[in-house]
Image: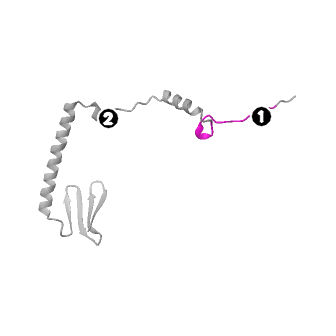
């Protein structure tokens, strides 16, 4: 004697053809199993005094870099003539094209390049 019956498969996940009713159950189940907690940002963990000190330090360093850059630019001129200039590990090439002023910047320590085009 032999018996048989018909089986049909229906997925649980609505993304794969399952019933949309299962969505909230699947989401709550995944949320409960998730043990990951996002770390708080460094800014939230700092005291107000630490944040003020970091902000002051950043502003001082920014002012120093602006002053040094201005001194370098004053020593070079106003980029009227094409040429190549070196600032530490950066090689800066400046020339004029039909599109405008082109500035190629090469970081000689990493090989990374950047091109800035200032339109006419």
- Residue 35: image location, x then y, percent: 45, 28
Left or right of residue 13, residue 55 in this image = left
Give the x, y percent position of residue 45: 28, 31
Left or right for 117, reference 36: left
Local packing at callout 1 (Cα closer than 10 Å; few below 14, some 14-19, many 20+) is: few
* Horizontal and vertical percent position of residue 113: 30, 58
Against 14, residue 79 (above or below) is: below
Which residue is pictured at 23% across the width and 61% down the height?
92
SS for dot 1: loop
What is the magenta segment's predominant secondary structure?
Answer: loop
Marks 2,1: beta carbons within 8 A? no
User: Which labelled disc corresponds to residue 6?
Assistant: 1
Position of the N terminus, as image quadrant, is: top right
Provide the residue designation for mark 2.
Answer: 41
Residue stretch in magenta: 4-18
In the displayed structure image, the side of residue 59 where residue 39 appears, left or right: right
Classify mark 2: helix, strand or loop: loop
In the rendered image, which quarter is residue 102 located in? bottom left
- Which residue is pictured at 14% across the width and 48% down the height? 64
Magenta span has 10?
A: yes
Q: Position of residue 10 (x, y in %)?
A: 67, 36
Outermost residue to the bottom? 98
């Amino acid at each position: 004697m032999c018996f048989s019956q018909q089986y049909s498969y229906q997925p649980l996940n609505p993304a794969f053809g399952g019933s949309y009713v299962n969505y909230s159950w699947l989401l709550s189940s995944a949320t409960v199993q998730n043990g990951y907690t996002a770390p708080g940002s460094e800014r939230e963990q700092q005291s107000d005094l630490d944040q003020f000190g970091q902000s002051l330090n950043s502003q001082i360093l920014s002012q120093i870099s602006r002053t040094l850059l201005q001194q370098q630019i004053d020593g070079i001129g106003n980029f009227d003539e094409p040429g190549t200039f070196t600032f530490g590990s950066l090689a800066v090439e400046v020339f004029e094209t039909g599109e405008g002023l082109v500035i190629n910047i090469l970081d000689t320590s990493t090989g990374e390049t950047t091109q800035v085009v200032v339109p006419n």
